[in-house]
Amino acid sequence: MSILDFYKDKNVFVTGHTGFKGSWLCRALIKAGAIVTGYSLEPPTEPNLYNIAGFQEKIKSIIGDIRNFEFLNSAIRSSRPEFVFHLAAQPIVRESYKFPRETYETNVMGTVNILESLRLNSSVKSFLNVTTDKVYKNNEWEWGYREIEKLDGFDPYSNSKSCSELVTHSYKNCFFDDKSVAISTARAGNVIGGGDFAKDRIIPDCVRAMENNEAVVVRNPGSIRPYQHVLEPIFAYLLICKIQYIDNRHSGSYNVGPDDVDCVSSGDLVKLFCSTWSNNAKWISASEIDAPHEANYLKLDCSKIKNTLGWYPRWHIEEAIEKTCTWSKAWLAKEDIPSLMDRQIEEYLGERKQ
C-alpha cells in the first residue's frame, strides 16, 4: 500500500490549510481520496497557493483563528477527524520581531487549543504538530542537531515553536498517557517549492525578482540552511501520522531535513536558482545594518526518522530548484497549476517518469 492509498476515505483535519505547506498537503490528501477539513485564517498573501491549487471545492474549508478555542473545538467536534495535522502558525522570523505577542499567542496558545480539543474529542487517533528546525538552541555547530538536543529558539518565532514542542510533550504525558491518541512533532528544515509567496523568504524573493526582471537581493548569502523541496516534509508528515496510527510506539519527535550535501548557503542556493532559471538571471548581496538576529549555521541529523520509519529525502537540491522553477514559470505563463502539482507529486513518489 502506498502512502496515498492509506489515506483514501480517511477523515483528516488540517490547520493552516490556506498556507504554503498546508496547500501542498491538502493537494496530496485530495489526490489520495481523503475526506479533508481545513481550519485556518484567510490566505496570508496575494497571490496565494490556496487559491491557485484548485482543491477549494473538494474540501470543507473553515476560516477561523487557531487562537479561538470555542470555534476550533466546534470545528473538530463536528468534523470528527481521525487524523489531525497542525500547521497553523505565524511562520516568519522577521514578523515575530515586529509582532512578538501575536506570534506567541498563535504558536503557543494555538497549540494548547488544538491539543485541548483533542482531549475533549475522542475521534482523533493520530496527531502531528509541525514545528521547525529552529526549535533547537543554536550553537552554530558543524554537525546536525538531534532530537535529544536542548530546545531554546532565539527569536520570538523560534522560541514560540520551542514552547509549542514543550506544550505537546506535556499534553502527551499528562492527558494521553493511555495511548488513546498517537502524538508526534516534526521539526522540518527550510522548504522551497512552487507556490510560496511569503515575504522575507529567499525563493519567493527570487521569483518576484524574475517576474519584475530584476536582480535577486540576498541578505545573508553565507547563512547555511537545510533546504528541501516542500514535498519532502509533506510526505514525512503523512508517513509519521500513518505509522504512529498503526503502532503508537513510534510517536515522538522527528527531524525532517535533507542530507548533508544539500545543506547549502543562501548565496549558493540563489546562484543555483539563477543558473536553472537562465534568461540572464542574476543576484547581488546586500548587507543590512541593525538587521534582526538570524542563525548563520543550522542543519539537522535525521537519523531517527530514517532508521525507525524508513523515510529518506528523494530530491537533491538541484532537483528541488528545478521543480520550483518549473512550477513558477508555469504559474507566470498561466498554465494549469493543479495538474502540474499532481504531476510533481507523482514524480516525487516515482509514479511518473520525469
Image: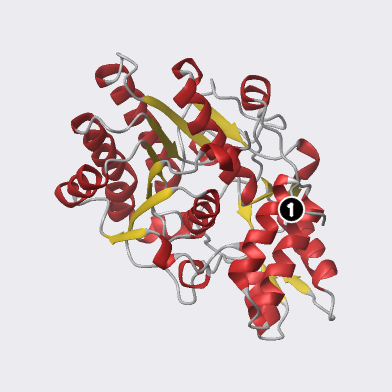
Q: Which residue is painted at 28% across and 52% down in the image?
A: 101
Q: Residue furthest bottom?
A: 212
Left or right position of 317 against 115: right
The front one of 55 and 258 is 55
In the rendered view, would you say 93 is above or below 126? below
In the rendered view, would you say 14 is above or below 342? above
Residue 300 % position (x, y): 64, 34
Q: Residue furthest left?
A: 70
Identify the residue under disc 1.
Answer: 347
The front one of 338 and 266 is 338
Can the viewer see residue 88 in this picture?
no
Q: How many numbered discs? A: 1
Q: Which residue is painted at 49% across and 71% down in the image?
A: 48
Q: State the image quarter where residue 276 is shown.
A: bottom right
Q: Quadrant of the N terminus?
A: top right
* Secondary element type, mark 1: helix
The front one of 142 and 340 is 340
Q: Quadrant of the C terminus?
A: bottom right
Looking at the picture, which amino acid does disc 1 mark?
Glu
Residue 108 % position (x, y): 31, 41
Residue 247 % position (x, y): 48, 18
In the rendered view, would you say 340 is above or below 159? below
The front one of 155 and 189 is 189
Can the viewer see residue 214 in this picture?
yes
Q: Which residue is painted at 71% across and 34% down in the image?
A: 312
